[in-house]
Amino acid sequence: MFKLRHFSAAIAAAVLTACGSDSTTSSMSTSTARGTLAENPPLRIASVNAAGLAAQLSANASGAQLLAITGAPSCGVDFYYIKFWTVGAAGESTQSSGALMVPTGAAPTCSGPRPIVLYAHGTFTDKAANIADITNPAPANNEGLIVAAMFAAQGYIVVAPNYAGYDISTLGYHPYLNAAQQSGEMIDTLTAARTALPNTFSSATSDSGQLFVTGYSEGGHVAMATQRALEAAGKTVTAAAPMSGPYALEAFADAIFFGSVDLGSTAFTPLVTTSYQQAYGNIYSATTDVYSATYATGIDTLLPSVTPLDTLFAEGKLPETALFDSTTPVVTIPGNTTLSDELTAALALPSNPANPDTPLFDLGFGPSYLVNNSYRVSYALDAAANPDGAVPVLTAGVPLAKVAPTQTLRLAFYMNDMRNGDWAPDSPTLLCGGDQDPEVFFSVNTDVMAAFWGGLPTGLITVLDVNATPAGPFAPIQAAFQEAGAQQLAFYLSPAGGSLTLAQAQALLIQAYHDSVEPFCALGARTFFSQF
Amino acid sequence: MKTLYKRGLVIALIASSAPLCHAAQASADTLTPDNEIRLGLYSIFYDASAQDISGPYVPAGLNLHVKNVETLYAAYERTLSTHFTFELALGWPPTTKTYGRGPATVGSVPYNGQEISSAKWAAPSALLYYKFFDDRTALRPYVGVGMTYVNFYDRQSTEAGDEASGGPTKISLTSSLGPTVSAGLAYRISPRWGLYASYSVSRVRTDLTADTAGVIRTTRISFAPGALVVSGGYSF
């Protein structure tokens, strides 16, 4: 019995000592200071060599088209998923995430000291979007793939946040088009990525110190705000290339409220209104101040959402295109019949058949609309009393409104307009876009910024309109964009493309226009950056 | 769950020790002493099957397999009666290695056939045997049933495993308690010395969790490990 007890004890000891030294994972930071890398080293989601990336892109038609634009990869790419600490619009601490894409390979352009491209993505309505997740064919990853193929596979280290309010961030909203928050988060992402890089599998690639800032659509605005913030902080920006962004927000919003309703506005409006409400707290007292009763309930937490946008439309949570009431308001300003009549006319349906954009703009009106007439009128009255220099009448120098607007949403646009503060870039800047863009109008954004900076030294600001007659150093890009459009039109007209009518085919092209510009502008950005 | 299994094992050990005093007296007039220590060799055939690995950023079709091992075997056996004995057995915990099974590469990272992880496998068994004939018979076949408790420690993700997982990875493997059946032959050389050969089969499973920078991937590995044991015993 004694011996048995000893043997049992031995077995028990053997079992209980089953707690040797296990391998460990990344260390988790205890600091929540902004810019702190939360997990170090970060997770590598995927690692592909140059041939593998080329094969992955060639596996489908859209990838093959992208490959034709970007050129064959010369480097492999390691995709890291970085988590870091930043703050929301009101200074709330939150974790956010993003991508660190590192070029790999034996070629001298793929390792050693390499430049960083700090990239800001466009509007996502998918709350779960993760630009680092190259294994997922969701729309967010199309943009990730474009950036990977265009920059990382050509030797640039890419750093790109998912933005607060997305993916792992617990922030209950996204600080959409908030210049201060988003530029700050971009810099936090860069800080975290620089911390991560030496500890990754790809530590043979290092930061050369060259920094390029770019982004598309929402990210165009973010990129420009980031360039401004970095320069204000005394950091060197080697060059920047904001693309198709809503830079001149006051002018852009004035154009929309006066009836030039952009595609996507019923998604953009809740995003930006919620963002500014969270930041400034004065956009509305109740959502019904802004929104029609049909959509007001819950709209302040609707986007971003894990529910697909099409489902939100189908469930009646958002109108698909009708931003405004098709029964347009009659404005009555006591004692000012002229202005009343002018505003009533300005807010009427954009039904002028001579206006080629009319069919598009008319989509922005309907009986089941998002923004109510009283709010639209309040905005228009402010815009009429204190007009922007670009809308409705173009004035020399395209200045912002002379004084800060009193209508709170317009004031928020004014504050986040990139003309605010009379800032001008110190570093070479390329502004790229397409002049037929139905989502982010080229004329009231890119053209306005180019005009606003018209007095800067020659060569500091370069404008690339991919839709313009091919000329100059970017002529091949312009020609390729226009050729791609012509080929797509021919496809839609062909039996393989459904034998659509010309009007139907053109409508499809215009719907896809904003997204179709991106890879060509990104190629323009890479061409521009390669000079430095 | 692990605590529950450990408690179950302790209860099994206590319960099994209760009849031993009676058994010692019952077999006092036999030729062979009632206690025996055995040492030998264990060949473990894991016969493992795993579910495909699931979790974020895992392509479809990633699986694992477990390589067979050999190790030292030690056991204590107590005679309860002419036909019944009770055995506590333990192999020297072998390092069990898991290998990638699936695509040749994940992205450009080698996967199929790569050693992904390793862990020490501690698997004590408690078995009740029925031995045919009596202890005056030199060659006695026997059969047994019991339970095996499996615990993993020194859990390591290898360099290749870290590469495939995307970074330094913490591996967790749950413990498991499962039934065991055994059959064998005992050859009595003398009252104190004997030779044994047996084959045992257990049914256990473990949930493998890999934590890479806070991203969790899991799979369940089911084992029906067969253990071929050749040993020599000394009775006292």
Image (cartoon, coloured by chain):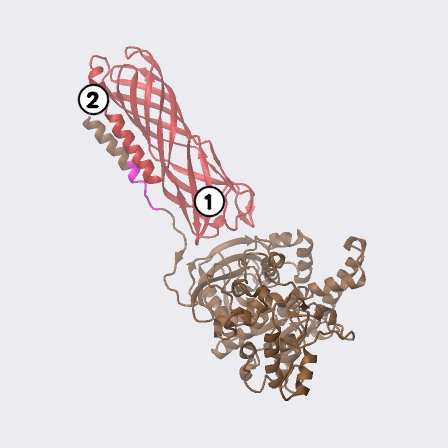
Q: Is residue A490 left or right of residue B181?
A: right
Let me know if residue A344 is in the magenta part: no
Q: The red chain is which one?
A: B
Q: Quadrant of the C terminus of chain A?
A: bottom right
Q: Mark 2 points at which residue?
A: B21
Please name the amino acid that badge 1 sits on.
Thr
Q: Quadrant of the N terminus of chain A?
A: top left
For the residue labelled by badge 1, is the local secondary structure a helix, a strand or a loop?
strand
Give the number of the disc on residue B218: 1
Q: In which quarter of the image is residue A447?
A: bottom right
| Residue A8 place in picture, x, y as percent | 25, 31
Location of residue B199 with respect to B29 vertically, above or below: below
Let me know if residue A18 is in the magenta part: yes
Return the chain for callout 2: B
Mark 2 and mark 1: span between their CA atoms? 46 Å
For the residue labelled by badge 2, is the local secondary structure a helix, a strand or a loop?
helix
Q: In this view, does A161 lie to the left or right of A521?
A: left
Residues A501 and B141: in front is A501
| Residue A317 place in picture, x, y as percent | 59, 60
| Residue B125 place in picture, x, y as percent | 33, 29
What secondary structure is the magenta-colored segment mainly? Answer: loop
| Residue A376 place in picture, x, y as percent | 61, 75
Q: Which chain is brown?
A: A
Q: Earlier in the sequence, mark 2 or mark 1?
A: 2
Residues A285 and B200: in front is A285
Q: Can residue A384 be seen in this snapshot?
A: yes
Please name the amino acid that badge 2 sits on.
Cys
Q: Can residue A247 be seen in this snapshot?
A: no
Residues B202 and A475: in front is B202
> What span is colored magenta in the figure?
A14-21
